[in-house]
Image (cartoon, rainbow, N blue to C red):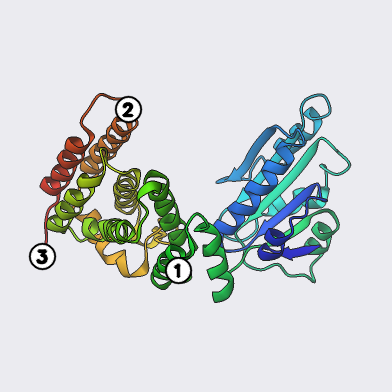
Amino acid sequence: MEITYNRFIRKPLYNSQHYFIYGEEIILRDELISLIKQYFKNKEFHNVVTLGITSFDNLIDEVTNLCAGSLFQEKSLIHIKHSEGKMPDAIKKLLEMGIFRNNSSVMLIVESSVSKLNKSTKFYKDIQDVFCILSCNKLDTNEEKLWLKRKLDFFDRDALRKFGANIHNNLNGNLIGQRNEAEILSLLYKNNQEQLSNEVSVDLNFDIFEFEDSLVKKDFNKIDQIIITLKKNNAQPPPPIIWIISKVITACYAIKTASSSSVNFSKLGIWSNKKSYYMNMSNSLRVEDIIDLQERIIVLDQSVKGAINLNAWDYLETTIMFLKDNLQLTD
């Protein structure tokens, strides 16, 4: 049986012991995998093992050992993760061998980034007999809007309309970016529920959606304005501000340490119209500066959580100044 992401979300099917989840949308794959893992965790599949990711050389031996061990130990959920390129031969051979069949103590989730499966092949027919096949490819515009609406379900109708339109217009087709923005707004909402009036929402919209732009464009005057605005209503730096700084610095590190052809901007949550700014910023920082900034972000996060006795606002401003001083500013 093969069903789409949307159909599964509307009516989850847990009547299969094995799942083959494929498609180019990693966010959708992650969502389905989380749901399935949680369901089977409640069915006592507590031993969760992830295999593959970078190498499939020992895949068959590893699954064979887990299947044998499960006869005498706790139930095992084996997650085989294939992230890029064509389907590895090891996965095809494993599924053809079927060593996991007729073992009620083992369940498989096979995840693949391939966008299509040829339904006329023996491979497809083999897995169709044993697996529930879930496809997670691009959503159409209406499906995407409904998906985003679910992510913003903590908002009232007016806020949902305003923020939902903002996010979708800027990030149409980029589910990673949309999810990131929804998580930021969720954090803001939880920290400002009693203040979530239209006026505050406008301020937060300005602060959050423009803070990232200001960082990567090196607009430190704008950054100072945003921080001044936030300090008026917050005893501590809001978690989303720290998250955004962390996102920018982490992305700069990924760009700095990778070849230009291997940078996956989509996975980093970077909009296409911001690529050049991120590239410029990463080129303006040394690797050691980025590492220092990452360490500072950890300290800042701990101070906000009360784990370190430190004035978080002062430390945030010092961190921003450190970033400014270490950027090799270019016009």
Write down the quadrant of residue 28 in the picture: bottom right
Q: Amino acid at mark 1?
A: Arg
**Which residue occupies the extreme right position in the image?**
102
**Which residue occupies the extreme bottom position in the image?**
141
Q: Amino acid at mark 3?
A: Asp
Left or right: 200 as drawn, with respect to 262: left
Please state which of residues 289 and 322 is positioned toward the viewer in this rendering: 322
Q: Amino acid at mark 2?
A: Gly
Numbered circle sitting on residue 331: 3
321 over 306 or under it: above or below:
below
Residue at position x 55%, y 46% in the image: 54
Distance from Cα at disc 2 to Cα at disc 3:
40 Å
Q: How many marks?
A: 3
Please state which of residues 261 and 152 is positioned toward the viewer in this rendering: 152
Residue 275's x, y, as percent?
A: 31, 65
Residue 226's x, y, as percent?
A: 20, 54
List the residue tagged with mark 2.
306
Residue 290's x, y, as percent?
A: 25, 43
Left or right: 312 as drawn, with respect to 24: left
329 over 310 or under it: above or below:
below
Of marks 1 and 3, the one in the foreground:
1
Of marks 2 and 1, the one in the foreground:
1
Q: Residues within 10 Å of mark 2 (few under 14, many from 20)?
A: few
Disc 2 or 1, which lies upstream in sequence?
1
Disc 1 or 3, which lies upstream in sequence?
1
Disc 2 or 3, which lies upstream in sequence?
2
Q: Residues within 10 Å of mark 3 (few under 14, many from 20)?
A: few
Write down the quadrant of residue 1 in the picture: bottom right
